[in-house]
Image (cartoon, grey):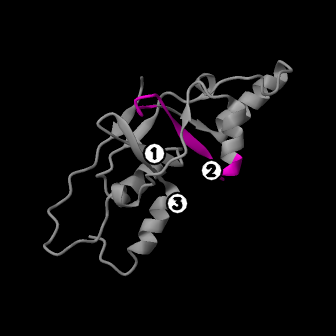
Amino acid sequence: MGIKSFLASRKKQQKAGDDIPFKVSDYMTRKLITFRADEKMEKVIDALIKYRISGAPVINDKHELIGVISEGDCIKQISESRYYNMPLDGSTVEKHMVKNVETIDGNMNIFDAANQFLQSKYRRFPIVENGKLVGQISQKDILKAVLALKGHNWK
């Protein structure tokens, strides 16, 4: 499996009394919509529309991250199925998910995470601890974090 992890950079010691949260884990989403590899693509498309999300992690029975499925993956499946004249042919998530998933460390600060978004094409990064999916940080979560820190010294 090709999961890459961007570990949190070492931070300088925080000053006493400095309790302003800057970590990804302080802003990540913990309650996630997830899919299983054997689920049908039609269910994924329905959930993406229903929950107004653009993609979600794919996990196994042990709650380990095994891939990510996105709107783009669904569009690709629709396009391919048209070629074979078999729209929504009962195809499963496993066939269309991205298996080479990049993750980031929940201890990474939000500014390094923002930089990671700039260096990648991704809109979200899963967070894995001890092999288990524990959350996800999106570009929107970074924006919310910055608004929450407005007026604080960002050093």
Task: Please say if the residues under marks 1 and 2 sit with CB atoms less than 8 Å apart.
Answer: no
- What is the residue that sits farthest to the top in this orientation? 84
Q: Amino acid at mark 1?
A: Phe
Packing grade of label 2 (10 A; few <14, some 14-19, many >=20) is few
**Up-down: is 28 above or below 97?**
below
Residue 140's mark?
A: 3
- State the image coordinates of residue 109 (x, y, percent, origin top left): 31, 57
Cα–Cα span, label 1 and label 2: 14 Å
At mark 2, the secondary structure is: loop
- State the image coordinates of residue 8 (x, y, percent, origin top left): 28, 48
Q: Amino acid at mark 3?
A: Lys
Q: Which residue is mark 2?
A: 53
**Up-down: is 91 above or below 7?**
above
Per the rendered image, the range of residues in magenta is 49-65
Q: Nearer the viewer, mark 1 or mark 2?
A: 2
Q: Nearer the viewer, residue 85 or 139?
A: 85
Residue 99's mark?
A: none
Cα–Cα span, label 3 and label 2: 12 Å
| Count of marks placed on residues | 3
Residue 138: in magenta span: no
Residue 125's mark?
A: 1
Q: Earlier in the sequence, mark 1 or mark 3?
A: 1
At mark 1, the secondary structure is: strand
